[in-house]
């Protein structure tokens, strides 16, 4: 099962739309998009409404993105994480770590 | 009586993980599990396979690991065996994230083991003396 990553701009935000399954095979694609987006310098939102599966390598990528963005004073939020993604964040006790939003203003 | 239901040999290749997940999902649903519980156990087995690929087999697709599914009236058991580098005992201790995480302190590594322990009722690691690892993950069937 593949992962499709699309990156787009919405106002001040760089939005990453991740659709599919995030595992050891596909999480490097998400990581590349996350780190490149943070490096751009703006706020980053990861739309996980279409993420049907996520493992610890995917969670590690989100944590890495949050840390990188926070160090640079940028916002890093998760947008509408799917039920499966919320479940793995809860099991990892990291569900309260992230700013989780229904939508990005203007998107 | 414990039945040995399925044994598969899987090349140490991340491209195959989704196929193992599909098999685990089907096996659990056939055994009467459903909903969130299926998703959790699929995640746990996937984490164990990921550990086998990354740490024991070093990501070498020439290596492989074996997944065995066993069942009884009381439990399902999924066992992974590899012939790669044996894990150090401290490496298989689960590292639970702190109760109040903040981004500066959370370490991404070690999360896989924690997730395995969270979703299975019993987990037993048995690293080999000079070669190989095995992890047995058990879940009890609700009576």
Image (tube, rainbow, N blue to C red):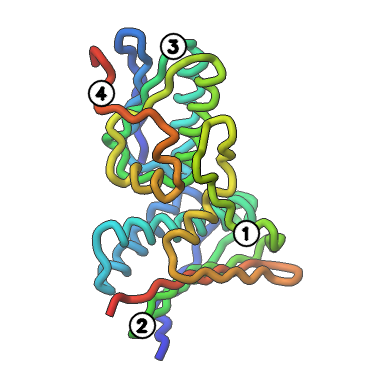
Residue A22 placement, left or right of B134? left
Judge from the rendering whether residue B4 lies leftward or rightward of residue B132; answer left or right.
left
Write down the chain letter for disc 2: B
Say how many tags the image has. 4
Q: CA gap, disc 4 to disc 3?
A: 17 Å
Give percent across and percent down for residue A61.
Answer: 49, 34
Mark 2–mark 1 distance (CA, rounded to whole Å): 27 Å
Q: CA distance from mark 1 to mark 3?
A: 39 Å
Kind of element beneath mark 3:
loop
Q: Nearer the viewer, residue B19 or A64?
A: A64
**Circle 1 or circle 3, nearest the eye:** 1
Q: Quadrant of the C terminus of chain B?
A: bottom left
Q: Position of residue A57 (x, y in %)?
A: 50, 42
Q: Position of residue A6 (x, y in %)?
A: 34, 24
Q: Which mark is residue B93?
A: 1
Q: Give the residue at mark 3.
A: A42
Residue shown at the point (32%, 33%) measured from the top left: A48
Query: Label 4 lies in what chain?
Result: A
- Does label 2 lie on the same chain as label 3? no
Q: Residue furthest right?
A: B130
Asked whether disc 2 touches disc 4, contact meaning CB atoms under 8 Å apart, the reply is no
Q: Which disc, if any, is residue A103? A: 4
Dot 3, how many residues are within 10 Å of its Cα: few (below 14), some (14-19), or many (20+)?
some
State which tag comes first along the sequence, 4 or 3. Answer: 3
Tell me: A71 left or right of A76. Answer: right
Discs 2, 4: same chain: no
Between the C-alphas of marks 3 and 2, the distance is: 54 Å
- Residue A80: assigned label: none
Residue B64 located left or right of residue A3: right
Q: Measure the C-alpha gap from mark 2 to mark 4.
A: 45 Å
Q: Quadrant of residue B132?
A: bottom right
């Amino acid at each position: 099962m593949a992962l499709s990553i699309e990156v787009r701009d919405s106002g001040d935000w760089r939005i990453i739309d991740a659709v599919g399954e995030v595992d050891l095979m596909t999480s490097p694609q998400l990581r590349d998009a996350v780190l490149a987006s943070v490096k751009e310098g703006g706020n980053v939102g990861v739309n996980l409404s279409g993420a049907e599966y996520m493992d610890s390598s995917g969670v590690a990528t989100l944590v890495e993105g949050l840390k990188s963005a926070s160090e640079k004073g940028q916002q890093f939020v998760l947008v509408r994480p799917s039920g499966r993604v919320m479940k793995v964040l809860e099991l990892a006790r990291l569900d309260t770590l992230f700013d989780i939003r229904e939508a990005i203003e203007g998107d | 009586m414990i039945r040995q239901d399925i044994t598969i040999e899987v090349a140490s290749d991340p491209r195959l993980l989704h196929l193992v997940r599909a098999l685990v999902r089907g096996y659990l649903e056939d055994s009467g599990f459903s909903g969130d519980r299926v998703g959790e156990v699929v995640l746990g087995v996937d984490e164990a396979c990921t550990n086998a690929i990354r740490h024991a087999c070093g990501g070498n697709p020439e290596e492989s690991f074996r997944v065995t599914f066993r069942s009884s009236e009381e439990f399902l058991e999924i066992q992974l065996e590899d012939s790669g580098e044996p894990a150090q005992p401290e490496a298989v201790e689960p590292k639970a994230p702190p109760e109040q995480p903040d981004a500066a302190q959370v370490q991404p590594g070690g999360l896989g083991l924690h997730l395995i322990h969270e979703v299975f009722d019993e987990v037993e690691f048995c690293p080999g003396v000079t070669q190989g690892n095995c992890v047995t993950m058990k879940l009890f069937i609700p009576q």
